[in-house]
Image: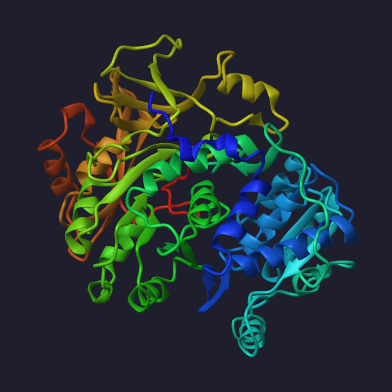
Amino acid sequence: MEKLPPELRPEQYASLAEVLDHVSSAHGPLPAFTCFGHSLTYREIDDLSNRLAGFLRNKLQMNPGDRIAIQLPNLLQFPVVVYAAIKADLVIVTTNPLYTAPEMKHQFRDSGAKAVVVLEAFCDKLESVIADTDIEHVVIARLGDLLPEPKRTLVNLAAKHLRKMIPAYELPGAHFFREAVGSDPIGTAATRAGENTALILYTGGTTGVAKGAMLTHRNLIANMMQLRSRTSLVMDDQSDTVVAPLPLYHTYAFQLHLLTMAYAGSHNILVPNPRDLDALVKLLRRNTIHGFAGINTLYLALLRHPKIGQVDFSTYRFCGAGGMAMSSSIAEDWQELTGCEILEGYGLTECSPVVAVNIPGEVRRGTVGKAVPETELRVVDDEANELPIGSVGELQVRGPQVMAGYYGREEATQDSINADGWFSTGDYVNISEDGYISIVDRKKDMILVSGFNVFPNEIEDWVNRHPQVIESAAIGVPDERTGEAVKLFVVAGEEAPGPEDVQSWCRQGLAAYKIPRKIEFVEDLPKSNIGKILRRELRE
């Protein structure tokens, strides 16, 4: 097991509040976060978060350990609220901005959130469910709250009138973000630390109802150092600019941008709406960028954009990927276009999230790299017996980044983490002799054809190499003869292949029992907010 170097020992910091003290003192005058063309320095973020922390503790009388939900897109307000909650000794609950009212209700009730900071555009949905939650305090943020005048007023007016983004709502007693950050700074630093929960992150729900993973101060600081051991190999402290298109409520972006890049003093450019590809490409064209973090579907969308060739990629040193398997063809095309290889990694919400990352200069395409330092891995069969190197089985992880458990779900916690601290990931993998991890597929997505295990990722990776296929998704459907058969959903390019063409292509690279029996062409595939393909919805 690889060890962290002495300078990256997590024990230096008893809590995330101490990490933030270091960030402010070490990087104060440097640009921290930029959004809508306006930047805030680490010192300005520190001052705003101190004031918001004072508001939460003194005005709202929130107590250490109370839960505060954050339902915001990637705006300057997001890091301010996160850092304020840490300083006020609260437990953060990040909430998907695209949640429907029932999904909001479930998460707020499940987490026991006492307060919520919410974008005004979502207040009508909050109004419809707040009576059925424990929420006592609402802080309403507007898009332009942290922009200078007159841009602030113009952005807020545009949101309210031109785009009609803000439905009518009534939330009596609610406070506004601008008011809150005008409060007196917090006087007493946070005291809870170590094994206390700092963050409740809800799993993506791609396999069922989302559960809240409790991540402690120790979990998050350890994983920050583990990830930093990789990013510092290609990123320069206090000078590099990283684009943040993935939502900050999501585990990977939260850890990368709000903790790891902040600890390095990097400049993070926040992208409120990564689906607006024109705006994203324009941002890439107008800024000198050193790092970019995305997922397979986002890289694919950028490669297809007509103006991507106008972007200067000569300064790029870090392109990260996680969240879903990278297609080999997309990784190859991206490197050919940019000259920067994608460092694919692997993680889970329950692991803070990083488990493995490819090492710069030692990338093995088609794998998620090697385990980050201080992390133990093993592969087991369905009875939890450890398998020899090279076998395909379920991955188990043990390390300081593994969560404390699922909030309010003791049985689910015991099912996931055994008495020896091994966390069962639900992912089938193969680990090579020299430690490279190949993700075979999700255990729950495996298709059983005539007794043979068929993994959707393998089929999709091969089909996506077809020159007329943009992307695909494979699922299992009932079959009287074979038990299950492979059904393939295909998003085709301008010249769509026929089903026979796709099957013929599959015969060139896949065993007979893996060839899709049914092929359906669709305009697009159902995806989560970060772009993961939702096979569950295809099955339903």
Picture quadrant of residue 318: bottom left
Name the side, left or right, on which 485 lies relative to 468.
Answer: right
Residue 261 is situated, as x and y percent measured from the top left of the image, at: 48, 55
Picture quadrant of residue 285: bottom left
Q: Nearer the viewer, residue 213 or 100?
A: 213
Q: Is residue 97 visible?
A: no
Residue appearing at x 83%, y 62% in the figure: 55
Residue 472 is situated, as x and y percent measured from the top left of the image, at: 30, 48
Residue 258 is situated, as x and y percent measured from the top left of the image, at: 55, 55
Q: Nearer the viewer, residue 55 or 391?
A: 55
Q: Nearer the viewer, residue 120 or 43?
A: 43
Q: Nearer the viewer, residue 380 or 528?
A: 380
Q: Is residue 451 above or below residue 23?
A: above
Q: Is residue 283 above or below residue 95?
A: below
Q: Please, which colouring scheme is shown?
A: rainbow
Residue appearing at x 69%, y 28% in the figure: 409
Residue appearing at x 48%, y 51% in the figure: 256
Residue 66 is situated, as x and y percent measured from the top left of the image, at: 80, 45
Q: Is residue 170 above or below residue 528?
A: below
Residue appearing at x 43%, y 23% in the figure: 376
